[in-house]
Image (tube, rainbow, N blue to C red):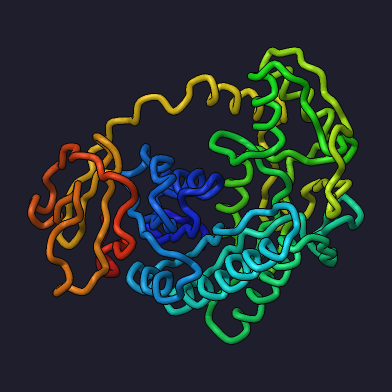
């Protein structure tokens, strides 16, 4: 799979931070892209490419949902990025990690296999290495110390096992700390909040190190993983290539914001599962993927701050063309996505509110904005591509 142009790529977790950037990149590569999301809550992240991708509402924790979506889409490659995030330890957190990152992965693997995929790209984590020596290496044994990493590490073993009795090829990418536009709450957004409020940046510890990786560089690595068969079967660590303390990272963010607030290291107690050093010099990624990071920390932070300054802004005008067998639905005023209701035909009493059957609009008629849907789409609505082979 040397090129993704014309290939069918499914991104599970396609409206997440990393997933939405990957969807945009795959569209730019010329792939036919299915973005799989559990809800419509973050669908706006795909507004710029909504004319070039299709969305499936499917939950990895519901096997019939995710398996059904990928059976219909028939992907060549599946990127699995859906996950329950790391958090403070509790029995509830244990359970969610097992449910989403464990059983959800099993369902995603089954869906990929039954959907006829050739390759499954597993979004793993450098946290698998725990407090092992740095820089990380692909041949290095996992030493997870938190429930999130324990399940993620086991997940890679499940990927390898699935490859042994199916036609799936598998590869894992293990990023360090990924940041950039649309990022979820993390130390960088914490600094921004403190600067905005004019208060000191309080830290849990501060002397621990991180290796910040800009999101565009992470996306490059995931795309390369699908294009380099020699790397398949490997779990490859990637990072920004610059190990620095969390204190130094916070100071860099403050500088990028043009602010002056103090950093209060050790103001809060460190987590019991704290990773004290994190770094990847990317030797394996360079050899196996021909990959290395393009963005320095200062460049990545500048782009991140610029995105904060610009904000969401106006949604770009995109023509979403109707096609027979699909549905078009507005998720906000003027923002229309292409979708197909997977309910049985005799249960399709009406098109979803805010949308219309594509067949009613004609096979290529541009569709103008409809009224916004109030809240999320119906729970029974699943959005998938038309039958295998039809380009949308």
Q: Quadrant of the image for the C terminus?
A: bottom left
- Image coordinates for residue 386, horizontal then vertical, percent: 25, 64
Work out which residue is located at the far bottom of the displayed protein and give it.
165
- Relative horizontal placement of residue 289, taking residue 388 as reference (left or right): right
- Image coordinates for residue 283, horizontal then vertical, percent: 79, 51
- From what the image shows, is residue 155 above or below residue 352? below
Residue under the image location 84 percent in, 57 percent down: 130
- From what the image shows, is residue 278 above or below residue 148? above
**Closest to the observer: 146 or 113?**
146
Q: Can I make out residue 246 in this image? A: yes
Task: Determine the image quadrant of residue 374.
Answer: top left
**Closest to the observer: 382 or 91?**
91
- Relative horizontal placement of residue 126, taking residue 382 as reference (left or right): right
Work out which residue is located at the far front of the displayed protein and give it.
91
How many numbered discs, if any?
0
Residue under the image location 77 percent in, 16 percent down: 261
Task: Determine the image quadrant of residue 305.
Answer: top right
- Relative horizontal placement of residue 87, taking residue 114 as reference (left or right): right
- Relative horizontal placement of residue 334, taking residue 266 as reference (left or right): left
**Closest to the observer: 312 or 124?**
312
- Image coordinates for residue 296, horizontal then vertical, percent: 71, 30
Q: Can I make out residue 287 in this image? A: no
Residue under the image location 73 percent in, 19 percent down: 199
Residue under the image location 17 percent in, 55 percent down: 323
- Image coordinates for residue 380, horizontal then vertical, percent: 30, 65
């Amino acid at each position: 799979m040397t090129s993704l142009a014309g290939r069918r790529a499914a991104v599970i977790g396609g409206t997440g931070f990393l997933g939405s950037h990957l969807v945009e990149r795959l569209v730019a590569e010329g792939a036919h892209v299915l973005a799989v999301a559990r809800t419509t809550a973050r669908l706006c992240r795909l507004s710029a490419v909504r004319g070039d991708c299709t969305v499936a509402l499917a939950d990895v924790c519901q096997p019939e949902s995710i398996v059904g979506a990928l059976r219909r889409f028939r992907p060549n490659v599946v990127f699995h990025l859906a996950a329950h995030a790391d958090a403070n330890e509790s029995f509830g957190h244990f359970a969610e990690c097992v449910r989403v990152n464990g059983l959800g992965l099993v369902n995603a693997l089954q869906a990929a296999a039954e959907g006829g995929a050739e390759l499954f790209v597993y979004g793993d984590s450098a946290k698998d290495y725990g407090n092992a020596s740095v820089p990380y290496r692909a041949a290095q044994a996992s030493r997870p110390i938190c429930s999130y990493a324990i399940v993620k590490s086991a997940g890679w073993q499940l990927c390898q096992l699935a490859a042994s009795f199916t036609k799936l090829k598998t590869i894992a990418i293990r990023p360090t700390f990924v940041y950039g536009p649309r990022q979820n709450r993390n130390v960088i957004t914490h600094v921004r909040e403190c600067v905005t409020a004019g208060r000191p940046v309080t830290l849990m510890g501060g002397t621990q190190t991180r290796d910040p990786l800009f999101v565009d560089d992470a996306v490059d690595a995931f795309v390369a993983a699908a294009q380099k068969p020699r790397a398949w079967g490997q779990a490859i660590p990637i990072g920004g290539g610059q190990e620095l303390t969390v204190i130094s990272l916070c100071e860099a963010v403050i500088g990028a914001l043009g602010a002056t607030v103090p950093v209060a290291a050790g103001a809060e107690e460190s987590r019991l599962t704290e990773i004290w050093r994190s770094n990847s010099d990317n030797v394996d990624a360079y050899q196996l993927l021909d990959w290395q990071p393009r963005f320095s920390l200062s460049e990545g932070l500048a782009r991140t701050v610029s995105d904060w300054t610009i904000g969401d802004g106006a949604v770009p005008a995109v023509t979403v063309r109707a096609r027979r067998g699909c549905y078009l639905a507005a998720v906000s005023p003027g923002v229309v996505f292409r979708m197909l209701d997977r309910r049985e035909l005799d249960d399709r009493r009406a098109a979803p509110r805010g949308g219309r059957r594509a067949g009613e609009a004609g096979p290529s008629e541009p569709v103008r904005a409809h009224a916004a849907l109030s809240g999320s789409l119906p729970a029974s609505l699943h959005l998938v591509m038309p039958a295998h082979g039809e380009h949308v």
